[in-house]
Image: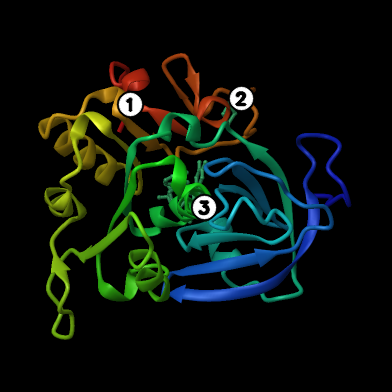
Amino acid sequence: MILGPIATNPYRPSATPLVDVIEETPTIKTFVVEPPRPFAFRAGQFAQVTVPGIGESPFTPSSDPAHPERLAFTVIRTGRVTEVMHTLKAGDPIGLRGPFGVGYPLDEFEDKHVLIVGGGCGLAPLRSLIYALFGHMDRIRSMAIRYGARESRELLYRSSYDDWAGRAKVSMACTIDAPEPAWVGHVGVVTTLLETIDTPIEDTIVVSCGPEVMLKYVTSALLRNGFSPDQIILSMNRRMSCGIGKCGRCSIGPYYLCRDGPDICYAKIKDFAHVF
Ligand SMILES: Cc1cc2nc3c(=O)[nH]c(=O)nc-3n(C[C@H](O)[C@H](O)[C@H](O)COP(=O)(O)OP(=O)(O)OC[C@H]3O[C@@H](n4cnc5c(N)ncnc54)[C@H](O)[C@@H]3O)c2cc1C
Ligand code: FES
């Protein structure tokens, strides 16, 4: 694949060197780039990232949308593209095209309590939302971050939790699936942390990102607790190809997740087959 200096064609990536690679967990790394031109994006929008000679995959920036000059992608090693991506070092080029999708509907968060529920590497896209909301805390009532990983060594961004939890109007809790000898925190899947939410349900909006099975259980738990489908926004990380609503690969009912999502209100998709 040819990497161009500036993307004029939506299928053509622009080349940018990695400026840093941060090892987050044994299977997750954060790749930092400073593109030749700032890559403006809204929290929740995604980019197609090319690993030269291998292929491209969609990733949502995990960095602050207020800083489009320095982007970060936090990536779990799972297959062909990400295996090779994890071998890249600072100075190696990657390609970027996008941003794609619509991003989180921040206007709908006005004057709401925002509950952010993440699982595993799903905290990566949510981190850009967390940063975006930190810039507008006067416009929301509160932010509750509830995050779970299988094991403590898989918890992302651990060094940030105290900072997040120490901010006005923010609460943060994390959990791991099973007990570990040195772990003194909460144990249980992330839905068990939803019991610690005490904001009025009618004024709360929920955003969740994680493996599909987690999204399914989080959604069921929320509905059981009295949330309505239109209060739940899910980040649906389906397989994608074109990223621009042309190939049909990412459809749920009439929606193309690359174009209409990937963060989409559960009320819109709940009646279609194979949502999870
Ligand atoms: C809009 C969007 C945003 C995303 N953001 C991130 C992110 O910030 N960080 C991150 O680590 N990942 C993210 N993903 C998932 C990421 O794109 C896939 O993990 C990646 O494409 C896998 O590529 P691969 O070639 O390494 O794996 P492959 O060899 O293609 O597949 C390896 C395994 O992963 C599964 N898989 C592949 N693609 C997906 C997918 N989209 N969702 C679930 N399972 C998949 C396959 O079924 C297979 O079991 C995002 C996906 C989308 C659609
Ligand atoms: S990825 Fe092609 S239509 Fe969504």
15 on left or right of 186? right
80 on left or right of 231? right
Residue behind mark 2? 247
Amino acid type, residue under disc 3 in the picture: Ser
Q: Quadrant of the C terminus?
A: top left
- Please tell me whether mark 1 sits on a helix, a strand or a loop: helix
- Please tell me whether mark 3 sits on a helix, a strand or a loop: helix
122 on left or right of 239? left
User: Mark 3 or 1 closer to N-term?
Assistant: 3
User: Mark 3 or 2 closer to N-term?
Assistant: 3
Residue 60, given in percent of the width and then of the height, sits at 55, 48
Q: Pointer 3 and pointer 2: residues touching (CB < 8 Å)? A: no
Tell me what residue is drawn at x 34 percent, y 69 percent. Answer: 155
Residue behind mark 3? 128
Tell me what residue is drawn at x 87 percent, y 49 percent. Answer: 4
Residue behind mark 1? 266
Nearest-to-viewer mark from 3 and 1: 3
Q: In front here: 244 or 107?
A: 107
Whole-angstrom CA distance, mark 1 to mark 2, is 23 Å
User: For mark 2, does the 10 Å Cα neighbourhood hold few (<14), some (14 to 19), or many (20 or more) residues?
Assistant: few
Against 191, residue 153 (above or below) is below
